[in-house]
Image (spheres, rainbow, N blue to C red):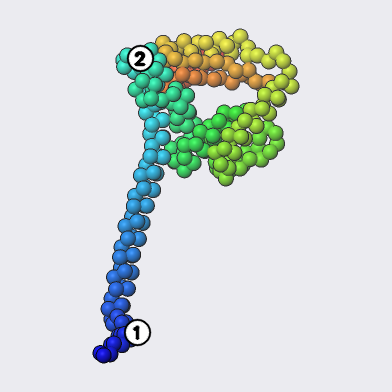
């Protein structure tokens, strides 16, 4: 009876060390290549995400230019709301929010804060009685609210900033209730505002609205709405002209 051959030993089954090392090198090289490809794709996605997120400011500027009565009419629409809804699929409030961002927040600051935070900062600035700008608030970092709370504008999230804006609106409204009733602008202040509004509309700014806003203990402020950024030089010239006319009348 033939004898069975003995099974190969472990040493006989083991691959040559040179072959093992070569296989390990190839595997490591492949892993490195895959990691490099993956990292490149991640960077590409981040770059494109940044482009999309930063485009909101350019869109806001374009909407601001589009919000012009003559352009709206030339495109065959009866309102800015119908134009942006039909042509862009935008709710008019969304369009107004973007316009407010470019109106109140400088580009570099807005791109740093991003759209949601920039929108929140606009709400906070509009809620405060002081004539603050986004740049001034960001430079100071801290803003004392009417409640007395010190709010860190830069460090806060968009949600926290919106909450601070709501807090400020409530505090200002409560303070207004306690203020002496009957505060109003003078007839002369209202006449000046009406005259400037007529001048602006006659100069092509059909949507211009100029209002004298009474302030307790001092003269009225002026509120100007419905004027496109492109028309600011023209509006400035009208304001200077009206100021000269008023000074001339007072000097007589």
The C terminus sits in image quarter: top right
Residue visible at 61% across and 9% down?
A: 187
Residue visible at 69% across and 22% down?
A: 176
Q: Is residue 38 above or below residue 170?
A: below
Local secondary structure at mark 1 = helix
Assess disc 2: are there few (<14), some (14-19) or many (≥20) residues with their C-alpha within 10 Å of its C-alpha. some
Mark 2 — residue? 77
| Distance between mark 1 and mark 2 Cα atoms | 86 Å
Residue visible at 27% across and 78% down?
A: 19
Residue 151 location, x and y as percent? Answer: 63, 40
Residue 53 visible in the displayed image: yes
Relative side of 33 to 142, left or right: left
Residue 12 location, x and y as percent? Answer: 30, 85
Relative side of 65 to 219, left or right: left
Q: What residue occupies the far front of the structure in this picture?
A: 1
Mark 1 — residue? 10
Assess disc 1: are there few (<14), some (14-19) or many (≥20) residues with their C-alpha within 10 Å of its C-alpha. few
Residue 43 location, x and y as percent? Answer: 36, 52
Q: Is residue 141 above or below residue 33?
A: above
Residue visible at 38% across and 34% down?
A: 58
Q: Nearer the viewer, residue 43 or 18?
A: 18
> Considering only order in the chain, which callout, 2 or 1, is on the residue closer to the N terminus?
1
């Amino acid at each position: 009876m033939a004898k069975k051959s003995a099974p190969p030993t472990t040493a006989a089954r083991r691959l040559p060390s040179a072959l093992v090392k070569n296989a390990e090198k190839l595997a490591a090289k492949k892993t490195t290549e895959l990691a490099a490809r993956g990292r490149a794709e991640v960077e590409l996605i981040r770059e494109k995400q940044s482009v999309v997120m930063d485009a909101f400011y350019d869109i806001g500027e374009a909407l601001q230019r589009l919000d012009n009565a003559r352009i709206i009419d030339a495109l065959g629409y009866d309102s800015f709301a119908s134009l942006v809804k039909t042509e862009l699929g935008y709710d008019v409030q969304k369009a107004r929010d973007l316009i407010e961002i470019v109106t109140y927040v400088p580009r570099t600051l807005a791109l740093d804060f991003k759209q949601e935070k920039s929108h929140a900062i606009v709400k906070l600035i509009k809620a405060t009685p002081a004539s603050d700008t986004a740049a001034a608030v960001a430079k100071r970092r801290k803003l004392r609210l009417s409640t007395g709370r010190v709010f860190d504008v830069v460090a806060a999230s968009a949600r926290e900033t919106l909450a601070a804006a709501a807090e400020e609106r409530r505090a200002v409204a409560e303070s207004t209730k306690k203020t002496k009733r009957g505060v109003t602008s003078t007839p002369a202040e209202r006449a000046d505002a009406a005259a400037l509004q007529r001048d602006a509309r006659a100069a092509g700014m059909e949507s211009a609205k100029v209002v004298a806003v009474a302030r307790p203990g001092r003269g009225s402020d002026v509120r100007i709405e419905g004027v496109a950024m492109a028309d600011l030089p023209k509006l400035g010239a009208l304001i200077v002209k009206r100021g000269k006319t008023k000074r001339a009348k007072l000097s007589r």
